[in-house]
């Protein structure tokens, strides 16, 4: 085994990434080669014959751009939905830091207390076990 405890995990991670990303790259390249024809994307819903805003690009560029835009919008939406959890985590981290500082202050300012020695209970307080 190696000295680095994370080397097995990182090797596995790299292997899994390669197993997923290499076929995905092959599919994307094949898609791009098969869909090279130009398409016109119109951004004017009121005049479809002569659009004021249109874009003519190869089909694979349009689809990949829409896919990337969808991933970005999904990531932003997810990030916005998790805002309350991030806020709570920051608040709790501050609270833990304050409590740790308070404990350290108590430890530094504490006065050692001498505990009295253990005293055996008086005979009258000792109970004998029940007899059957």
Image: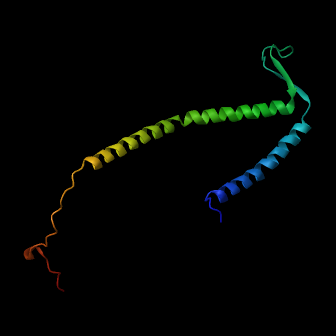
Furthest residue toward bottom? 132
Quadrant position of the C terminus in the picture: bottom left
Relative to residue 47, is residue 65 depicted above or below?
below
Viewer-proximal residue, 98 or 39?
98
Q: Residue at the spot x=12%, y=72% of the render?
A: 121
Quadrant position of the N terminus in the picture: bottom right
Q: Residue at the spot x=17%, y=81% of the render?
A: 130
Left/right placement of residue 101 relative to residue 88 reads left
Locate residue 123, reporting x and y percent: 9, 77
Q: Quadrant of residue 68?
A: top right
Viewer-proximal residue, 123 or 115?
115
Locate residue 125, reporting x and y percent: 10, 73
Q: How many marks?
A: 0
Locate residue 72, reporting x and y percent: 68, 33
Left/right placement of residue 98 relative to residue 111 reads right
Left/right placement of residue 12 relative to residue 90 reads right
Q: Residue at the spot x=82%, y=49% of the render?
A: 23
Q: Residue at the spot x=90%, y=27% of the render?
A: 38
């Amino acid at each position: 085994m190696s000295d680095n405890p994370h080397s097995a995990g990182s090797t596995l991670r790299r292997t899994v990434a390669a197993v997923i990303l290499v076929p995905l790259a092959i599919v994307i390249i094949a898609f791009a080669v098969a869909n090279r024809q130009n398409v016109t994307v119109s951004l004017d819903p009121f005049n479809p014959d002569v659009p004021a805003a249109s874009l003519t690009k190869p089909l694979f560029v349009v689809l990949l751009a829409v896919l990337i835009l969808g991933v970005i919008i999904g990531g932003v939406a997810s990030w916005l939905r998790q805002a309350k959890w991030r806020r709570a985590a920051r608040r709790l981290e501050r609270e833990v830091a304050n409590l740790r500082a308070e404990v350290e202050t108590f430890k530094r300012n504490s006065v050692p207390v001498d505990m009295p020695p253990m005293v055996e209970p008086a005979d009258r307080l000792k109970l004998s076990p029940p007899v059957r």
